C-alpha cells in the first residue's frame, strides 16, 4: 500500500522540491516513510521557527518555495512567526502539518497537540490554508499551492493533513497534476498609456521592489532609457548594479529622495507594496507624490495600497517592463544632458553628508565583507549594521542582501535564514549579520548548521544588549529598562556547538577571518564588538 504521506513526498518531488525543513513528531512520522525513495533532502532545525526561517532564506535565494514538515499544535504555533515574516515580504513557503483525526476536529477533547482550529490560526499569514479530508485531494491542492508560488504574489500556503488521512491508502489516487499557469502579462492598452506618460515626462522617477528582482535586465534598461533616478526597496537591492549612476539606493524615507520625488513629473513603481519599512522608516508619513503614479504589480489587491495609482497595471514585472521598453526607445540623451544622473549624484552627495558618524565603522565593516567576498549573500537580522547597511550597502547582484528589519521585522531570523540561503547556494559565501540579542533568539540553529554541513559565516555584532532599542529609549527620555541583557560568552558557546569562533581585532584581521571562514567546512562565528577601537578609528 502507498500511503497518503508517501504520495505527498512523491508529488513534492514532481514539483521540483529538493529540500524539506522539519521536526518530526508522532503525528507526522508517516510523512517520512517515503522520503528515502525520493531525492528530497531533510534538514532538521532545533525549533520550528528555525524551520520556517530556513525555508524563507532558501526561497529568497533559490526563487523556489521553501517547504516545511511541522507537527500539529505547538509545531504550528512555533512556526507562525516565520510565516508572518514570509507573508510580510511575499516569500513562497509551503507548510505541511498534521492535525488531529477528522472525527476529532473541533471537538475540544484535549487530544495531544490539539488546537481549537489550526486553520484559523494560519489564516492571517497564508494565501490559503487547506485541511486535506481525503488523499484524493492531494494533487489538486498541491497544484493550487504551486500555481500561487509560480504565477501570483507569492505567500505561504498551509496544508494540514489529519493523522487518519496521512496514514490512509493513496493507491487509488489519480496523480495527474495541473499545469502551472503562465504569469499574467499586462493589458496592451495600459502599456501604451504608460508609455505616453513616461515619454512626456521630463523628470521621471522609478521605484523598484522585490517583485522586480527577477527582472533586473529589463528594469536596468528601462531606467536607463528613461534616464530616471531609481530607488530600490531593501528587497530590490542589487537590481541595479553597485555604483549605477541612476541609483538612489534604498533611501525613499529620507528627505533628499522625497524632495526629488516631489519635483518629479511621473513616477513608475514596479513590484513594490510601497510599505512603511521602505518608504516611511522614520514613521513621519511624509513621502508625497504630486504627479501621475504608474504602478505595476502582480497583485490587484495590492496595487492601490498606501499610494493610490493613476494607472494600475496588473502584470508580472518582467513582462510589463519588457513591453514598455519595446515602445519607449532611447530618450534623447543629448537634449537632457543626463539630467537623471546629475539629480541622482546630487541626492547621493546630500545623503552622504547626513549619515551619522556611528555608521562609519559599520560601513567599513560591510565594505570589508564585500571586498573580501565579492559573491557574498548577506542575510541580516534586526541589528545596527543591518539598519545602516539598508541605507549604505549596495550588493553586487539581486537576492544577495535581505533581512528581517523589513516588513514583519522579527528578531532571530538571520542565522536560520542564512542556513537556508547556504543550502540554496552552496558555492557562494553566506553571512548572517546578526546582533547578540537576535542571535540568542535562535542560537541552537548553530547545531543545525553543523549537522546540515552548511558552513555559514555568522558576523556577530556584539554590544551586550538590545542596543538599538536602548538608543531609542534614550532619545525619548525613557528609562532604559529591559535592554541591558546578560550576554553570555557567545564565542565559547559557538565553539561548544562545534563552530569556529573568533573575535576580530582590526579590519585586516576581519578580512583574514572572513577568508578562513569562507574556506571552512563548518560554520564560523566572527564577533565584532561595537566598542572595538578599530571601528571608532575609521576616518
Ligand atoms: C521578536 C521580536 N521581539 C522584539 C523586537 C524588538 N527589537 C527590535 S531590535 C531589538 C534589539 C535587538 O538587539 P540585537 O540583536 O543585539 O541588535 P542591536 O540593536 O543591539 O544591534 C529588539 C528587542 C523584535 N524586532 N522582534
Ligand atoms: Mg545587541
Image (tube, rainbow, N blue to C red):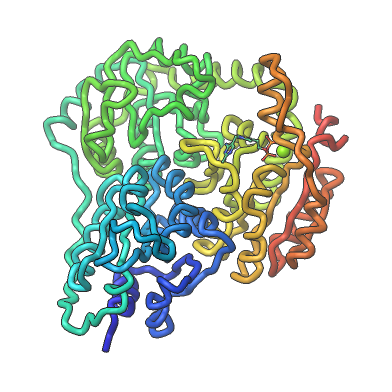
* Figure check: 353 above or below 105: above
* Figure check: 72 above or below 401: below
| Left or right of 396 on screen, residue 307 | left
Residue at point 17%, 78% (across, down): 173
Picture quadrant of residue 482? top right
* Figure check: 141 above or below 413: below
* Quadrant in which ligand 1 is drawn: top right
| Left or right of 494 on screen, residue 223 | left
The quadrant in which the N terminus is found is: bottom left
* Figure check: 161 above or below 119: below
Residue 187 coordinates in the image, percent (x, y): 14, 37
Residue at point 66%, 59% (across, down): 444
Residue 473 coordinates in the image, percent (x, y): 68, 21
Picture quadrant of residue 202? top left
Q: Residue furthest left?
A: 189
Residue 389 coordinates in the image, percent (x, y): 62, 35
| Left or right of 313 on screen, residue 510 | right
Residue situated in front as seen by the camera: 162 or 410: 162
Residue situated in front as seen by the camera: 15 or 320: 15
Question: Is residue 61 among what the camera can see?
Answer: no
Residue at point 62%, 60% (across, down): 445
Please give the count of numbered marks on the rendered protein: 0
Q: Residue furthest bottom?
A: 1
Amino acid at each position: 500500500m502507498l500511503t497518503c504521506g508517501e504520495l505527498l513526498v512523491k508529488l513534492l518531488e514532481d514539483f521540483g522540491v529538493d529540500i524539506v525543513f522539519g521536526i518530526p513528531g508522532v503525528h507526522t512520522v508517516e510523512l517520512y516513510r517515503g522520503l528515502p525513495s525520493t531525492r528530497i533532502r531533510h534538514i532538521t532545525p532545533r525549533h520550528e521557527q528555525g524551520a520556517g526561517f530556513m525555508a524563507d532564506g532558501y526561497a529568497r535565494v533559490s526563487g523556489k518555495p521553501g517547504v516545511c514538515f511541522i507537527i500539529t499544535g505547538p509545531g504550528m504555533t512555533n512556526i507562525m512567526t516565520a510565516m508572518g515574516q514570509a507573508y510580510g515580504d511575499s516569500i513562497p513557503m509551503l507548510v505541511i502539518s498534521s492535525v488531529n483525526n477528522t472525527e476529532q476536529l473541533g471537538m475540544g477533547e484535549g487530544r495531544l497537540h490539539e488546537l481549537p482550529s489550526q486553520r484559523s490560526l494560519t489564516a492571517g499569514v497564508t494565501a490559503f490554508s487547506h485541511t486535506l479530508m481525503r488523499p484524493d485531494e492531494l494533487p489538486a491542492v498541491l497544484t493550487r499551492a504551486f500555481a500561487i508560488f509560480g504565477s501570483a504574489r507569492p505567500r505561504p500556503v498551509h496544508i494540514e493533513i489529519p493523522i487518519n488521512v496521512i496514514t490512509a491508502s493513496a493507491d487509488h489516487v489519480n496523480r495527474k497534476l495541473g499545469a502551472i499557469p503562465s504569469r499574467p502579462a499586462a493589458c496592451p492598452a495600459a502599456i501604451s498609456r504608460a508609455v505616453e506618460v513616461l515619454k512626456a515626462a521630463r523628470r521621471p522617477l522609478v521605484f523598484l521592489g522585490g517583485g522586480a528582482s527577477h527582472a533586473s535586465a529589463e528594469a536596468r534598461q528601462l531606467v536607463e532609457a528613461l534616464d530616471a533616478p531609481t530607488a530600490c526597496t531593501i528587497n530590490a537591492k542589487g537590481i541595479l548594479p553597485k555604483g549605477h549612476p541612476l541609483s538612489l539606493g534604498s533611501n525613499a524615507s529620507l528627505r533628499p529622495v522625497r524632495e526629488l520625488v516631489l519635483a518629479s513629473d511621473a513616477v513608475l513603481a514596479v513590484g513594490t507594496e510601497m510599505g512603511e519599512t521602505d518608504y516611511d522608516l522614520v514613521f513621519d508619513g511624509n513621502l508625497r507624490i504630486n504627479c501621475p503614479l504608474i504602478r505595476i504589480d502582480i497583485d490587484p489587491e495590492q496595487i492601490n495600497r498606501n499610494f493610490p495609482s493613476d494607472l494600475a497595471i496588473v502584470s508580472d514585472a518582467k513582462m510589463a517592463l519588457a513591453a514598455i521598453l519595446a515602445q519607449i526607445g532611447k530618450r534623447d540623451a543629448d537634449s537632457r544632458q543626463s539630467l537623471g544622473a546629475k539629480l541622482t549624484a546630487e541626492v547621493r552627495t546630500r545623503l552622504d553628508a547626513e549619515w551619522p558618524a556611528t555608521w562609519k565603522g559599520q560601513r567599513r565593516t560591510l565594505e570589508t565583507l564585500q571586498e573580501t567576498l565579492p559573491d557574498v549573500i548577506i542575510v541580516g537580522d534586526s541589528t545596527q549594521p543591518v539598519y545602516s547597511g539598508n541605507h549604505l550597502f549596495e550588493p553586487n547582484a539581486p537576492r544577495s542582501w535581505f533581512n528581517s528589519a523589513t516588513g514583519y521585522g522579527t528578531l532571530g531570523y538571520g542565522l536560520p535564514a542564512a542556513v537556508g540561503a547556504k543550502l540554496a547556494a552552496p558555492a557562494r559565501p553566506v553571512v548572517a549579520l546578526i546582533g547578540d540579542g537576535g542571535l540568542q533568539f535562535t542560537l541552537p540553529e548553530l547545531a543545525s548548521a553543523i549537522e546540515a554541513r552548511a558552513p555559514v559565516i555568522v558576523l556577530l555584532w556584539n554590544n551586550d544588549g538590545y542596543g538599538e532599542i536602548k538608543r531609542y529609549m534614550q532619545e525619548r527620555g525613557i528609562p532604559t529598562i529591559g535592554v541591558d541583557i546578560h550576554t553570555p560568552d557567545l564565542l565559547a558557546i559557538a565553539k561548544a556547538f562545534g563552530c569556529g569562533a573568533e573575535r576580530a581585532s582590526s579590519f585586516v584581521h576581519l578580512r583574514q577571518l572572513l577568508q578562513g571562514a569562507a574556506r571552512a567546512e563548518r560554520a564560523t562565528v566572527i564577533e565584532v564588538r561595537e566598542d572595538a577601537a578599530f571601528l571608532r578609528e575609521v576616518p
